[in-house]
Amino acid sequence: MVWTMNDYPSSMKKLEKPVRKKAIDIANSMLDDGYQEGRAIPIAIEQAKEWYENADKEKVRSYEKSGKPTKRSKEGKEKTNNPERLEEGEVVYSHDEGWAIASTGSSQASQIFNTKDEAVKRAAEIAKNKGTSLTIYRADGAIEDKRNY
């Protein structure tokens, strides 16, 4: 799942805005690298708090005002997230390990669930938060349902 300043884990609720933004960026990057949500969230919060304590005030203000979240590539170079990713719909499809959800056009599942109902429920939440669509596929690959939010 891609978190935003409008949709983030409840454990980040009481963080100051720049700390929350940094924690969201770190957590999104960790998820991209394959970390599980339960592990990524506390690590991201702690790293964001440490960053805030050690960064100079001008850097914090600049980061807070920047409109585009950033993340680190595997090589450690800073890059800008693709803003179109938030406009992509969600898809639910059969996966070797159960039922997967992913953004439209993504080559990799963002989450995998044991049941289709669980996957549809989560994908619908994401699509509603992003204001996009949800496409649900049958096990045979045929489209079962399309929803717009």
Image: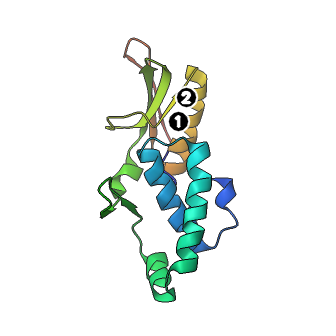
138 or 8, nearer to the observer: 8
Amino acid at circle 2? Ala
Residue at 47% of width from left, 46% of height from top?
31
Residue 79 location (% of width, % of height): 31, 63
> Quick check: can you spot residue 7?
no
Amino acid at circle 1? Ala
Q: What sort of colour scheme is used for the picture?
A: rainbow
Residue placed under numbered mark 2 in the picture: 119
Residue at disc 1, secondary structure? helix
Residue 7 location (% of width, % of height): 57, 55
Compared with residue 28, is residue 64 higher up or lower down, i.e. above or below? below
Compared with residue 99, is residue 15 higher up or lower down, i.e. above or below? below
Residue at 42% of width from left, 75% of height from top?
66
Q: Quadrant of residue 102?
A: top left
Tell me the crowding category of disc 1: few under 14, some 14 to 19, or many 20 or more residues within 10 angstroms, Cα based.
Answer: many
Residue placed under numbered mark 1 in the picture: 123
Residue at disc 2, secondary structure? helix
Q: CA distance from mark 2 to mark 1?
A: 6 Å
> Quick check: can you spot residue 92?
yes
Compared with residue 131, is residue 6 higher up or lower down, i.e. above or below? below
Residue 84 location (% of width, % of height): 34, 53
Q: Quadrant of residue 132?
A: top left
Is residue 28 shown left or right of residue 116?
left
* Contact check, label 2 and label 1, Cβ < 8 Å: yes
Residue at 68% of width from left, 55% of height from top?
10
Query: Which mark, residue 70?
Result: none
Number of callouts in the render? 2
Residue 57 location (% of width, % of height): 51, 87
Q: Quadrant of residue 142?
A: top left
Tell me the crowding category of disc 2: few under 14, some 14 to 19, or many 20 or more residues within 10 angstroms, Cα based.
Answer: many
Residue at 60% of width from left, 62% of height from top?
46
Compared with residue 120, is residue 59 higher up or lower down, i.e. above or below? below
